[in-house]
Image: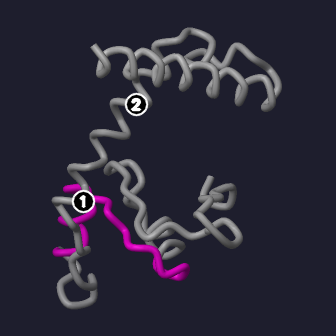
Amino acid sequence: MLEKIRVRGPVGRPRTRPDAVAGDKAYSSRGNRTYLRERHIKVVIPEKRDQAAHRKNKGSRGGRPVSHDADLYKERNTVERLINKLKAWRGIATRYDKTPASYLAGLHLRAAMIWIKDLTRTTH
């Protein structure tokens, strides 16, 4: 998924590398952390308890504890709520559309619906 990121700025070519990636504990594998570290992307993923216990059991051979920015991780909640709003639309939640283009069009349509609803809520 990170290979597809294109963040447009006001000028120049789109950025392909985010400053940080926040994920839940399901993405805390060594492979994911290594990939992000090699691309100089800040990892904001908490360590699983069993992984931390295994690392501690290895002693000095287990390596250092993972760094974790708790404040940045809290901001992840905003993204999670948006994803849940998108998935409230059945076509997106079930991936009913078979082609990537039609699925992306559905995402754009649902995002526009959410934006318009929020816009009308703030203007009244």
Comparing 71 with 36, the one in front is: 71
Report x, y in % for residue 34.
Answer: 48, 76
Q: Amino acid at mark 2?
A: Leu
Label 2 Cα crowd, 10 Å radius (few <14 / some 14-19 / many 20+): few
Kindly identify the residue that appears in the image at 40 percent across and 31 percent down: 82
Residue reaching furthest to the top: 90
Q: Give the image's coloring scheme.
A: one colour
Residue 30, which numbered label?
A: none
Q: Residue at x 82, y 26 (%)?
A: 99
Q: Which residue is mark 2?
A: 82
* Residue occupying the far bottom of the picture: 60
Check residue 74 for magenta coloring: no
Q: CA distance from mark 1 to mark 2?
A: 17 Å
Identify which residue is drawn at 27% across, 89% down.
61
Instruction: Tell me where residue 122 appears, x and y as whole percent.
Output: 29, 22
Q: Is residue 99 left or right of residue 45?
A: right
SS for callout 2: helix
Q: Which residue is mark 1?
A: 72
Name the N-terminal-most of marks 1 and 2.
1
The magenta segment is 37-56
- Placement of 42 over or under 105, stated as above or below: below
Q: Secondary structure at mark 1?
A: helix
Disc 1 to disc 2: CB gap under 8 Å: no
| Kind of residue indicated by mark 1 | Leu
Relative height, residue 69 to residue 56 (above, below): above
Question: Image quadrant of residue 8?
Answer: bottom right
Q: In which quarter of the view is residue 111 placed?
A: top right
- Position in image of residue 13 (x %, y %): 71, 70
Asked if residue 55 is among those painted magenta in the image, a careful observer would answer yes
Q: Is residue 43 left or right of residue 57?
A: right
Q: Horizontally, is 111 left or right of 28 in the view? A: right
